[in-house]
Image (cartoon, coloured by chain):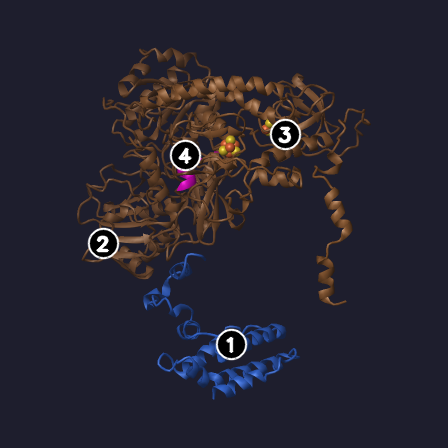
Amino acid sequence: MATGAVAALRNMKVAGNSKSLEEARARVFDFFKLACRSLPSVMDIYNLDDVVTRSQLRSAIASQIRKNSHVTNTKVIDMLLFKGMEELGNIVEHHKQRHHIIGQYVLGKDGILQDLSPKDEGSSDFLKNFYSGNYF
Amino acid sequence: MGLGLLASRLIRPQKTAARTLLLRSIVTKPELQSPEPATAPQPDPTPDLPPRTPLAGARVHFPNPEDAIEVFVDGYPVKIPKGMTVLQACEVAGVDIPRFCYHSRLSIAGNCRMCLVEVEKSPKPVASCAMPALPGMKIKTDTPVAKKAREGVMEFLLMNHPLDCPICDQGGECDLQDQSMAFGSDRGRFTEVKRSVVDKNLGPLVKTVMTRCIQCTRCVRFATEVAGVQDLGMLGRGSGEEIGTYVEKLMTSELSGNVIDICPVGALTSKPFAFKARNWELKGTETIDVTDAVGSNIRIDSRGPEVMRITPRLNEDINEEWISDKTRFCYDGLKRQRLNDPMIRSSDGRFKIVSWHDVLAVVAEIALQVKPEEIVGIAGKLSDAESMMALKDFINKMGSNNVWCEGNGPSPNADLRSGYIMNSGISGLENADVFLLVGTEVIQLTFLICLGWNAWIIAVMSFTFCYFFAYELVCCFYDVLNLFFAFMFCTPFCTFSLPLCLIFCLMKCQPRVEAAMVNARIRKTVRGSNAKVAYIGPPADFNYDCEHLGTGPETLTEIAEGRHPFCSTISNAKNPAIIVGAGLFERSDKDAVFSAVETIAKNGNVVRPDWNGFNVLLLNAAQAAALDLGLVPESSQSIESAKFVYLMGADDVDLEKLPNDAFVVYQGHHGDRGVYRANVILPASAFSEKEGTYENTEGCTQQTLPAVPTVGDARDDWKIIRALSEVAGVRLPYDTVGAVRSRIKTVAPNLLSVDEREPATFWASLKPEVTQKMSSAPFDPAIKNFYMTDSITRASKIMAQCSALLLKK
Ligand code: SF4
Ligand code: FES
């Protein structure tokens, strides 16, 4: 299974520039589908079954994509896609280690601190930054 | 053509080449073999020569314009004041003359001969550092004669200099290395065995490799002239010449580290830094020092997250180019005893690591439970202005007004700035002609009376004297080589330093410990203009002539009432300066003492529109800014009734009287004294890790810059207080350093004009009368141990070694 995904990724051609926003959009969906399809093998390689479910990872990927939903420049979208493809390739080819995946996609940016209780919802950006580090 | 063929061609000895090799005698650069002195009349300097800029911003002051003379340097006319040396004239003309022994802040020795230049009509090249420039002199710095002279001197110097640059700590910043690349010959002719010299033990700070020494005597002159200790000197003649301490003895000066910087070669290097790093892999950050109230300008050299060494930066108004040993070597304290995680003391008395989120919640909850007037905030010695502003705002918002900075005493006078800063300025002290030091002695009395040594010294002296004179006679007949000049020049020096040593060994004094750099200034003034120094306080030794008037307030009263002979000295003086130690702030009769001093100042005409000689010498880096920001406690008894104490790096406050159920928060970077009593620890960043504003004792605002990242989970001081204020529900209105600074601007605008000295505007004549009586208790030393005064220096191993070895009773 894993080999299948690797092979699929390896055979991906670097596409040329998207000609229109529609084309770029279609490519993003293709990328998302590709990522989702590789999820079973990813969970397998990194032993993620006991920490996360497939659907959680799927929404993690979706949220990463949505983070850039405001981008309309096709060149930028192509670049982001390229980066995403690269990241996916790294993950699928086991260039990362388990804690990378857990840190980046399971716990997320704020998850690792685990100190955000619902009480802090109203706190200022300063305080949130303060909890995460000295340099902001 | 194959590769092998090529290689064999290269290897095969070529006849012609071998012949030239054999024939070629080993000489200096061929064009220098028979240099013609440039006496032949040269074409007049063309007037359209582009003007050169003076070296290193060298400036000329003309005390009186008619004394200006004109000389020609390489054909460029320059105007210089009379009395300047040829070397200085060249500097003004923008020509850098190579040198080893000349140092602008030391006396002229003229013994290395590296600075030889050609002067028209002089038969031989002259040592430019020792030759006064004369009107119309035509100086040539770039002629074959000058070049050959340099090359010759370089060859002689390298004769006995070991070839250990790869393992030398000076490598990369070595004058000898640089100058031999620039001016030296490309080969040596010396095939004999090099001399070797026994290394000397100068104590825990200065490492010596005496074989590398080129006898420039800079270190000897520095010790004698600037540091004021007669520890170093020169023994022997010719190739037997050695720098040493005469007797087996450590160098006991608080400025001893500076010999590392002035030594042009690697003979004197830093012992703690030895073999730790090469200087080209270090990142330099220009910042300031906070271990005393002088605010010396320093450069922190770091590699990655580690501070590797501290070196001085030039600042004419504050530290010139020297720094004290505490400043230079305290850096290893930054690596030890650091607090790196927020911690809460659990019921079994041990600290438990918790997250920032939890710790702030706990602190805020307790702070909100106690009554507002039971909240106390104390800023520490090393606090920057930003964090003190935040602390004061936070404590005030919590409803309390009990916030102060340690060292400022129970009732500091923060209203009149002239009452707590050094009004003359540190460099202004050089204009004074009489000094009265009140309670700012603080020297450990260490009489190392070693009668045994004297006999030793006398024996050595009588021997060397005979030896010198005999040698001198012989030398005169061999006036062939420039290098012999070099040795001859040393002779008067050696003969003088020995008898001096005899006097001073008897009375070994310890550093003036409150502010070594200010002390160096006073010493400079005493040396330069024979200023008189008198002093009231516990018996102490100074490294300059000083009259001890008394130990306590009685003497002060006598002078104030005009009954003391010293009064006339003050009133006859042109620019009298009174320096009051900040140790007096802690006395309960402080107001009375200060009013006595002010009476003296008034009677002695110490404060005039053109001269303000009333000076307070502060002890800590935070003090001046704290007083500017108004960190003054509401009541002096607040510790006794406190229930919530916020120590912001305060380690030296007396917490004895604190009630047992009080909750103590310690925010700081070192697990020092304050932590023993703390219930909660909030890790903060040290001065090398943050951007902070400090005001020094003369009222000059300066900023530190972060050189290395913070340790562990530590945060900047003001950020911690800002975050805590939000958790406690009294959110402070600033989120950035810039915003804190604009808040400071509303309180003390002078703290924003960085690198500028803001003199006090009003003088204390507006003060109310003081009714307090002076107690008769003599003045106590304010600092017990010069080397360990704050949490950083107390954590430092080097400082511990220093105090063990150098302050030995
Ligand atoms: S030790 Fe250094 S500073 Fe001292 S004389 Fe030798 S070379 Fe000069
Ligand atoms: S610098 Fe002039 S003799 Fe040394």
Q: Which chain is brown?
A: B
Q: Which tint is chain A?
A: blue
Q: Nearer the viewer, mark 3 or mark 2?
A: 3
Residues under labels 4 and 1: Cα distance?
A: 59 Å
The amino acid type, in three-letter code, at marker 3 is Cys
Q: Where does ligand 2 appear, by image quarter? A: top right
Q: How many other residues sit within 10 Å of disc 3, few (<14), some (14-19) or many (≥20)?
A: many
Q: Are marks 3 and 1 on the same chain?
A: no
The quadrant in which residue B748 appears is: top left
Cα gap from disc 4 to disc 3, whole angstroms? 30 Å
**Any magenta on residue B322?**
yes
Circles 2 and 4, Cβ within 8 Å, touching? The answer is no
- State the image coordinates of residue B46 (x, y, percent, origin top left): 80, 30
Q: Which residues are magenta?
A: B321-329
Task: Specify whether disc 3 shares its chain with disc 2.
Answer: yes
Classify mark 2: helix, strand or loop. helix
What amino acid is found at the position of numbered circle 2 in the picture?
Gln
Q: In this rendered view, identify the residue nearer to me: A53 or B239.
A: B239
Residue at mark 2 to residue at mark 1: CA–CA distance? 54 Å
Q: Which mark is residue A90?
A: 1
Q: Are marks 4 and 3 on the same chain?
A: yes
The verdict on label 3 being within 8 Å of ligand 2 is: yes
Tag 3 subunit: B
Name the residue that disc number 2 marks.
B369
Q: Dot 1: few (<14), some (14–19), or many (≥20) neighbours within 10 Å?
A: few
